[in-house]
Image (spheres, grey):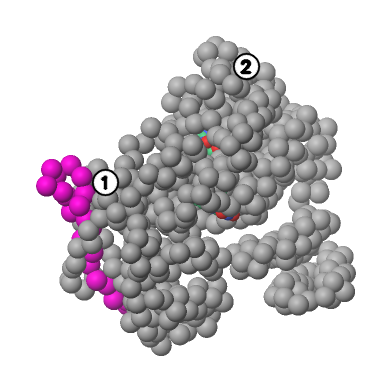
Amino acid sequence: MGKVALRAGVGCAVVACGIAAVAVGRRARSRRGWGRAVALLKELEEGCATPVLRLRQVVDAMAVEMHVELASDGGSKLKMLLTFVDSLPIGMSLIARSFSLLRSDQLHVCVVGSGPAGFYTAEKMLKGHEAAKIDIIDRLPTPFGLVRSGVAPDHPETKIVVNQFSRVAGNEKCSFFGNVMLGGHGVSLLELRQLYDVVVLAYGAESDRSLGIPGEDLGGVYSAREFVWWYNGHPDCKAMPLDLKNTDTAVVLGQGNVALDVARILLRPTSELAKTDIADHALASLQESTIRKVYLVGRRGPVQAACTAKELREILGIKGLHVHIQESDLVKSPTDEVELENSRIRKRVYELFNKAATSQQSNPIMGQRELHFIFFRRPDRFVPSESSLHISGVRLEKTSLEENGDSGRQVAVGTGQFDDLNCGMVLKSIGYKSVPVDGLPFNIHQGIVPNIRGRVVNGAQLEHTEVEHGLYVVGWLKRGPTGIIATNLYCAEETVESVLEDVKRGLAASGSQKPGRQGLLQILENKGINYVPFSGWQKIDSVEKLRGQLKGKPREKITDWEELLRVAHA
Ligand SMILES: Cc1cc2nc3c(=O)[nH]c(=O)nc-3n(C[C@H](O)[C@H](O)[C@H](O)COP(=O)(O)OP(=O)(O)OC[C@H]3O[C@@H](n4cnc5c(N)ncnc54)[C@H](O)[C@@H]3O)c2cc1C
């Protein structure tokens, strides 16, 4: 029976994948075709008893995989797929079973972090457990994590997701507590675990990976995270000592989407940025900026560049920009050809580089802004200026690609040939890193909380692993700093499934005597923490929108801690 069910499940999943892939992949697919695919998928789903959840997960995973590419097509197909997947009946899945069993038991849940992972978790918990009471805490007075402080100001369509999150926050069973930090002078993990049946950590990745090369502490070297926070008005980076007037050249280390974002902000005409929700201080600095040339440096070649076609197309399309790509860097090895064959995304990116290289003018016109893609180079050290306090350049080592036996990936290895690239500013876009809090198992090497499908575990070796009952993790803190906003939806779904399964098995105490929200309010009062409720954020939101209106922008962000709190409590 088990084997038959398994075979049926795998079969159905494979067929479903095929249908989803075909359905999604065909651009010119008619509505009727889509309807047929949906009907067929539903039929399959109803026909399979046990594997419904698995079927759904396979389709979900495919949606994540395909998201980047679909987003490049304008996102409409993606939205259809997501809507469809979201509305799939979940049949005999664990969620449904837990739900029916746990309807009447009160469940106190605390979600730490109000970014996409936190809000998707809250949303799924509300759907999955009728008696769940959810408190979302965030160290900032404002919600939405990187949707507010990461997503570029000239990508307003990406931020629309906050409407969905606001509806979650507006649910009577959900409360937001801004200006409440886990750790430091805020609340401790131990306290939260004593107050709540379930604690889900969704506090993201708020630190940076370092290169570990000489000169990294010199003035003029910043992480892309700080720069992004600065232009997005994160209150921690308002006072960043950024000088855009002492140089005409900036180097961005990395060629992923964040690297492209920061390069675009440096190069895009400020008249265009002025219409976005970019922070006022950043716009003023960019208006006075003397930076004309931006170099985007990558260890590997155009075939391996980590960006997506949509973002690349956007930066290449900046009005009046001179783009330079060394044509010899576009020569492909047989291994590159295989890589391109295996990835449509990589192929599109490569084609864009190729097109840009062949259509570029040989020299920039006087005063024209320049974007240079530098491939096959890795930073060796930051070169100090005469004062030894500031950088005057980056020493780069030429690399070549070697196949890594284990992973099959091509890795960059140094060739011992060096050259210096003069510049007055460097932005390191080499990855974000999560930080541990007291009492939390943490994998320093990977920069994540060790977990099994969202259940936090401790113990270094797999055989000695112990589950931390009632403690869960989701989002960048769970997976590392990769993936787009939608990736966190699938991630949250997995974590919530684990929570509900544990509640059902009595492993996360439901119906217990834990005080939940009342206990939190008591602790906040005892500690003198002036928390910001969602209504406080709504006041900030209104003031920002009003100030923005006066300047012809969607909002003028409040970037000062004290002012944020003042407005929230007005
Ligand atoms: C520069 C940049 C641009 C991006 N652009 C896009 C894009 O255009 N489209 C897209 O789909 N994806 C984009 N992404 C990816 C997307 O933002 C992430 O996938 C997503 O935000 C990760 O969600 P998260 O909830 O895990 O973390 P976060 O969004 O970082 O949320 C974490 C939350 O936890 C809070 N927090 C941190 N520490 C504590 C603490 N100790 N106590 C309490 N609260 C705490 C933070 O204030 C924050 O609100 C971008 C990412 C970056 C870095």
In the image, residue 404 above or below residue 485: below
Residue 177 visible in the current orientation: no
In the image, residue 35 above or below residue 159: below
Q: Position of residue 407 (x, y in %)?
A: 42, 72
Q: Amino acid at mark 2?
A: Ala
Disc number placed over residue 570 in the picture, else none: 2
* Element class at badge 1: loop
Question: In this picture, which residue range is highlighted in magenta?
Answer: 383-408
State the residue at coordinates (49%, 31%).
Answer: 559
- On the rendered image, what quadrant is the N terminus found in? bottom right
Is residue 399 on the magenta stretch?
yes
Q: Is residue 125 shown left or right of residue 401?
A: right
Quadrant of res 284: top left
Circles 1 and 2 in contact, beta carbons < 8 Å? no
Residue 360 visible in the current orientation: yes
Residue located farthest toward the left when viewing the structure as drawn: 386
Disc 1 crowd, CA 10 A, few/some/many (<14, 14-19, 20+)? some
State the residue at coordinates (73%, 66%).
Answer: 77
Which residue is tagged 1?
Answer: 246
Q: Position of residue 216 (x, y in %)?
A: 25, 48
